Image (cartoon, grey):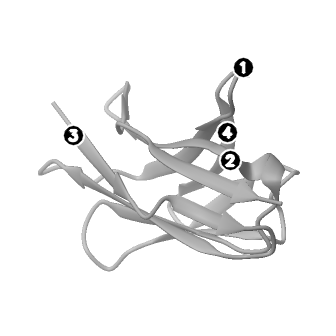
Amino acid sequence: QVQLVESGGGLVQAGGSLRLSCAASTVFTINTMGWYRQAPGKERELVAVTTIGIANYADSVKDRFTISRGKAKNTVYLQMNSLQPEDTGVYYCNAALRGSYYWGQGTQVTVSS
């Protein structure tokens, strides 16, 4: 069983920045890690994902968010700049390992206008 622990959410004004962190507890190396978000009343959506150095982003966050892997094994970060109210939601870390997908508990990001 893989456990993902996220941190870094919070309340920020529009135009501000936040950095989310996620660490996965497993002895195996996870190649694919990403971030999803779910706004109130909406479905969970992909924000960004990285696989062996290749990153992909949702169109809505391109040029504002950056996903990166940490030096520590099985860590991933999401640097979020120029945040807008529509970025508000619960952000979930995701990891793919050996055909299974794992989720963190989520961290709230609230952007005020």
The kind of residue tagged 4 is: Leu
Mark 2 crowd level (few <14, some 14–19, many ≥20, 10 Å Cα)? many
Contact flag, marks 4 and 2 (Cβ < 8 Å): yes
The kind of residue tagged 1 is: Gly
Residue 42 x/y as whole percent: 73, 22
Residue 62 x/y as whole percent: 83, 62
Q: Which residue is mark 4?
A: 46
Residue 86 x/y as whole percent: 82, 47
Q: Is residue 74 above or below residue 15?
A: above
Give the SS element for disc 1.
loop
Q: Which residue is mark 3?
A: 3
The mark nearer the N terminus, 1 or 3, is 3
Contact flag, marks 1 and 4 (Cβ < 8 Å): no
Contact flag, marks 1 and 2 (Cβ < 8 Å): no
Outermost front residue: 113
Q: Label 4, label 3: how many angstroms apart (C-alpha)? A: 20 Å
The kind of residue tagged 2 is: Val
Q: Which residue is mark 2?
A: 47
Q: Label 4, label 2: how many angstroms apart (C-alpha)? A: 4 Å
Give the SS element for disc 4.
strand
> In front of the other: label 1 or label 3?
1
Residue drawn at 68 percent across, 27 percent down? 40
In the image, which disc is placed on residue 28? none
Splitting the image into 4 quarters, where does residue 17 fall?
A: bottom right
The kind of residue tagged 3 is: Gln
